[in-house]
Image: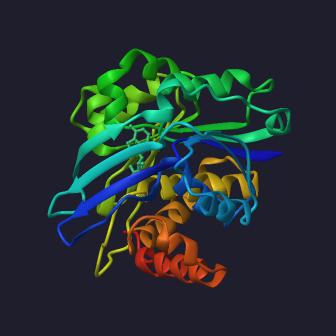
Amino acid sequence: MSLVVVGTMAFDAIETPFGKSDKIIGGAATYIAWCASNFTPVKQISVVGGDFPEEELQALADRQVDLEAVQIKKDEKSFFWSGKYHMDMNTRDTLDTQLNVLANFQPVVPDSYQDCEFLMLGNLVPAVQRSVITQLKNRPRLIVMDTMNFWMEVAMDELKATIAMVDVLMVNDSEARQLSGDYSLVRAAATIMQMGPKYVIIKKGEHGALLFHENKVFFAPALPLEEVFDPTGAGDTFAGGFIGHLARTKDISFENMKTAIIIGSAMASYCVEKFGTQRLRELSKEDIANRLSDFVQLVNFDIKLY
Ligand code: AMP
């Protein structure tokens, strides 16, 4: 039984009000794998070009990330994304998206991935996300999907067809509004749940995340940090912590999902402390435990009910 992750592995160029990076390693599935592998082994599905460093793949393999389904297109270039953050570090503009190897990506799910119990569809072409679901002979116990405004703009129908097949959809607040056409996040979540997913997670950057299910809602704050260096990958890291915890505990109850979004938030708070995946690579089990206890302190209070 296993966790399968699909998504981009990429080069990013990032500009924040405080600094600028050259081309660094990024991609939704890269962040998810670095994070989720703290909790459970990962089987990765992605595509890279001949320009993607061998050491990067090796570093993931060293963390029990199975790369059998990561295609390497020797004569092509890896996916490239560039973004610029506004002063609030919560909003950003995409400066450039070069699909490169992603343009003709056809994932192949190997036999060794057919034991998939938890499927994390990281941000990717919606039709490609769907093709992974349909190649699995048995439906996973839980399918979690992340997406972004880019796909709402270029492939809304495809996106809705994929959303209809998943259990949990994760989007940020502006994407939830764009997808539902509703400003109220409560109504937006209800509309999205009618599209198929039984659970909706709405990420609000430094303002935390909301988990909706039926008529229930749970809120997890983001840890107030003195310095946010680079928010790129925070959403993917959150996703990796969320599904990594569920896959480790094999418990998909609403109660356990509450713990999972706290773990996702704790991991995301580490991600933003340095550029790219750098901070995630350094984390020890002790760091993770310390940050979780910071979260417990942050939200723990006793109140007398009248
Ligand atoms: P996040 O900050 O969590 O939204 O994720 C940022 C990561 O998503 C970056 O490392 C990018 O390489 C990747 N990314 C950006 N645009 C796309 C896209 N259209 N499809 C898939 N991945 C993307």
The picture places residue 160, in percent across and down from the top left corner, at 44, 20
Q: Is residue 163 above or below residue 49?
A: above
The picture places residue 156, in percent across and down from the top left corner, at 36, 20
- Point 52% across, 61% down: residue: 264
Q: Is residue 186 visible?
A: no
Q: Decide if residue 37 is on the left or right side of residue 230.
A: right
The picture places residue 250, in percent across and down from the top left corner, at 76, 51
Indicate the quadrant where residue 48 lies.
top right
Query: Is residue 80 or residue 202 the one in the foreground?
Result: 80
State the residue lying farthest toward the left.
87
- Point 32% across, 56% down: residue: 13
- Point 44% across, 78% down: residue: 302
State the residue lying farthest toward the front.
75
Query: Is residue 195 or residue 172 the one in the foreground?
Result: 172
Q: Is residue 270 visible?
A: yes
Q: Decide if residue 117 is on the left or right side of residue 204.
A: right
The picture places residue 202, in percent across and down from the top left corner, at 39, 46
- Point 56% across, 78% down: residue: 282
- What colour-coding does the image apply? rainbow
Q: Is residue 107 above or below residue 230?
A: above
